[in-house]
Amino acid sequence: MINGVVLDNILSLVRKPGRYLGGEMHAARTDWDEAEVRFALVFPDLYEIGMSHFGLQLLYRILNERPATVAERCFAPDIDMEQQLRRHGYPVFSLESRRSLAEFDVIGITLPYELCYTNILTILDLAGIALAAEQRAEQDPLVIGGGSCSLNPEPVAPFFDAVVLGDGEEAVLEIADTIGQARRQGTNRTATLARLAEIEGVYIPSFFVPRYDNGELAAVLPLDPGYTKVRRRVLPRLRQWSGEGQLVPVVKPVHDRLGLEIARGCTRGCRFCQAGIIYRPVRERGVEEILQAADKGIAD
């Protein structure tokens, strides 16, 4: 854990210290010692961008509503902060408790767009966690990916212990339940991954072997005859969202407004657009639900 004095010394040397303070309105007050499973939710871009991401807000709230689970946030540090962390030998840390990511049970990393992939490696390196999943020790956190780019996971598959394909609201709770049970029973890392593989939508890269042809991916071959393919997780209906309790950033985000998900997917299906293709089928919220969520969110 990075104490306040150390953090203050670093923050005085960076351009936007508010990115690393935490303490926002509606931020979770986590009880680390009482938690059974601890998640670090990582968005591999700057605070201003990650705090505009609706999926991060959604998973943060879902996990912190689950008994005995803690979810804290971490964003990619800007270049000046990265330099200070390396210069002083400090790890990248979560905003809520200022703990190193290596102290968590799960590091959940959003895959929003390909240009942030190198930031993922930077964050793992700053946390002192081996980049390749096969090089991680038994006590290291499980690194799990998700988000829109997870539907094409192979470019980053070697760095992840597991990848969630598709909608994550239900899957993340099942992952928390599975890891919690594995911890209570003292299950080792490989056996825990085998349990996670039983969850619909969860891809375990180490249970497959990629085959390349002249540098191009030709096939992904399963090692277990009972686990040969992964079906994308699809929620038949969007989870009820009241609009209340959204995190209010302390640094102006790129989307400086209340975020409401009115639909997932798009009826147009333009070929250049992720939303119209990978988020099928289209699921829309009713007008009354949207208006009520907007009223509650603004009032909150």
Image: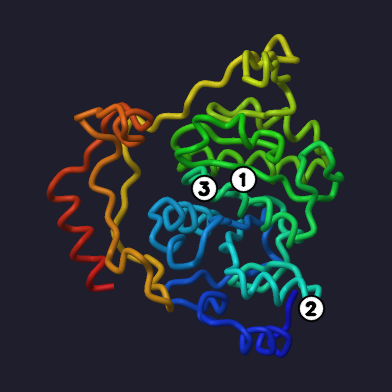
Please name the residue that numbered disc 1 is placed on: 176
The type of residue carrying mark 1 is Ala
**Circle 2 — which element?**
helix
Q: Is residue 68 visible?
A: no
Between 250 and 210, the one nearer to me in the picture? 210
- Whole-Å distance between the Cαs marked 3 and 1? 29 Å
- Whole-Å distance between the Cαs marked 1 and 2? 34 Å
Depth check, mark 1 against mark 2: the one in front is 2
Q: Residue at x 62, y 89 (%)?
A: 12
- The tag on residue 88 is 2
Q: Is residue 235 visible?
A: yes
Q: Residue at x 69, y 67 (%)?
A: 92
Q: Position of residue 57 (x, y in %)?
A: 43, 58
Q: Residues within 10 Å of mark 3 (few under 14, many from 20)?
A: few
Question: Is 205 placed left or right of 47 in the picture?
Answer: right
The residue positioned farthest toward the top in the image shown: 225
The type of residue carrying mark 2 is His
The residue positioned farthest toward the left in the image shown: 287
Q: Residues within 10 Å of mark 1 (few under 14, many from 20)?
A: many
Image height check: is 51 above or below 279?
A: below
Q: Residue at x 63, y 14 (%)?
A: 219
Please name the residue that numbered disc 3 is placed on: 115
